Image (tube, rainbow, N blue to C red):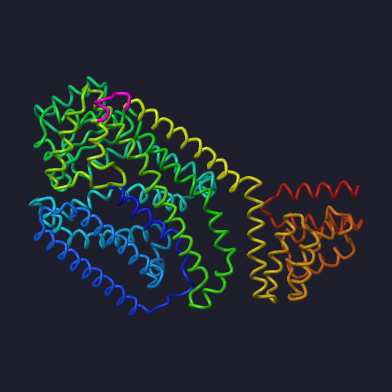
Amino acid sequence: MFTNFIYFIIVILIFSTYHPPEKSHLDIAETTFFFLFGILLFAAINYRRSHALARQALQQPDNPAFQRRYNLLFTQHAVLAIILLATNIYLLDIQLRLMHIPLIAELPTLAGILLLFLFICYLSIIWWFAHKPYSLLFRTGLSRRAFVTSHISFNIPIVLPWVLISLISDITGHLPFETARTILSAPAGQIFYFSLFLAAAAVYAPVLVQFFWKCRPLTGPVRDRIETLCRKAKFRCRNIMTWPVFEGKMLTAGVMGLAGRFRYLLITKSLISILTPEELDAVIAHEIGHIKKKHLIFYLFFLIGYMILSYALFDVVLYLLLSGNWLYILPRAIQIEQSTIVSVSFTLCLALFLLLYFRFLFGYFMRNCERQADLYAFTVQGHPWGLIRSLEKIAFFTGTAKSTPNWHHFSIKERIDYLEKSAKDKRWIERHNRKVRRDFILFFCGLSIAGYFAYAINFGSMGKTLNLHFMTKILNQKIGQEPDNADLHLTIGSLYHENREYEKAIRSYETSLKLAPRNPETLNNLAWIYATCEEADKRDHPKALVFAIQAANLKRAPHILDTLAETYCVNGLYKLAVETEKEALSMNPTNRKYYEGQLEKFEDLCG
């Protein structure tokens, strides 16, 4: 499930960061042909490789490397499905065509839902053809249809939170509540909204998940025994459920839910059937250990940590990409729009970060949390032998080699070895608990530092400095390629102006004015500097008045009239300043208080 979670996050990144071109690269017939060809090619690859693996399983039924090959095959095909979806979006412009549909244009999340559905279809092709090697590997009579539908129902809860939060956000944007829209459009509002949704989902999601997984309450003596163990461990849950994943053929158990009122213990009937009562107690105690050791709460914070780090890296990655010369050379070389290159590169960077964060950092913590849960079961029973026997049985009945590695669990051999070592010297239990506590503290310290930088980059002076540095660098590169582009000189002049680099700002504005003499914005900005510059040697009041009059003659806008009023004022023409500012106010400008303050200042000077 955790691996599929990473796959879906990458897919969401792909279409969320997609920047559509102005027009499609292909016509509708070409798009349809290549789209269908991609599906057929993908199905053919899955058929050939899955059947080849099934033949190997028949020839070497007891080969311990077979499960590793099966897992590798699925991973490779899932990555191929992601590449195929990205090809549909970036080369076939599937998402662009979807956005032309009126309803989807109003609710962009619908396009994302359709693309997620397409990705699930690709995964279904993988599952359809992987059924044969799977049935040989796990010696199960599970039907192909049940195998595919079980996978689909297993993965729906992964994408459901994104679907809900995105739809609510889209719908809120169309409601007649201006204040709510303003708050949600701001970065702080988005963070608050997402955090609130995540907290609610963490509490209430288990109710929906057990519904989609079609879990049913466990009954009989086994339930009575589990309830006795729960009371002994002072563990609270809403219900103990049978977990019909893959029709209950999988040998597994789990726990979900932060709050006891919405917490569920899950176990498959197949696992119950192979375990003795003592072994079953050990497995349930392991799951209780995840709650007692606060692992689920930590996993929630780990997910929040990913959002914080992504937020901190977002602007930095974008600026680094935009500052590279290759970004201006490559689009011309391969005849692809620059926005597409930026979008693809940006997605690849974020996907790489996601893989590193979850696969390695999260994987490290999950492995150690699983070991801590093993040791909790040891502590509850007073010995590790029940859990060791259950692990050995799971390895035997699933045909899994004990040494088979797993990115979010230690191998069964490693788990058994540590339990046996702890049985000989129980100090190893506390050593591991101390190690987990230390790692948690280090993680939260690092997350706090990352949160500070995320805030500083996006809201503080650090972010403003970085923004100005990167943007001026990017614009200077563009000006080197298009020296006669007046808008580029105006834009970089505005950045210099904002950074109080007045000499550079004046030089850029004047260059822009030479290229486009009748641009009212350039005239207005120059007039404002000459009228109000903090550096006295840069002020030139008569010239400011000339430029301001020219700008106002070209465009009667509140900000331009305000500049004209300011130039009248600094030249001693106070009555004209009052009249002009009143005209600006009559246009009902957005920042009305500022204009009223200006008018009051001019009226005071006028006497």
Q: Is residue 374 above or below residue 380?
A: below
Residue 76: % across, % down: 28, 61
The answer to if 424 sits in the magenta stretch is: yes
Quarter of the view holding residue 131: bottom left
Position of 235 compared to 513: left or right?
A: left
Q: Is 479 included in the stretch rendered in magenta?
A: no
Looking at the image, the residue that sits furthest to the top is 232
Residue shown at the point (30%, 28%) measured from the top left = 260
Q: In the picture provided, is 215 more to the left or to the right than 106?
A: left
In this picture, which residue range is highlighted in magenta?
421-428
Q: Position of residue 311 (x, y in %)?
A: 51, 49
Helix, strand or loop: magenta stretch = helix
Please tell me whether residue 467 is drawn above or below residue 230 in the rendered image.
below
Considering depth in this image, is 587 or 301 the residue closer to the camera? 301
Residue 411 percent coordinates (x, y): 25, 43
Tell me which corner region of the image, top left, top right, bottom left or bottom right, holds residue 224.
top left
- Residue at 35%, 77% in the rendered image: 28
Q: Residue 430: where, in percent of width, then height? A: 35, 25
Left or right: residue 343 versus residue 152 is right
Q: Quadrant of residue 261?
A: top left
Tell how many labels.
0
- Position of 333 with respect to 203 (left or right) is right
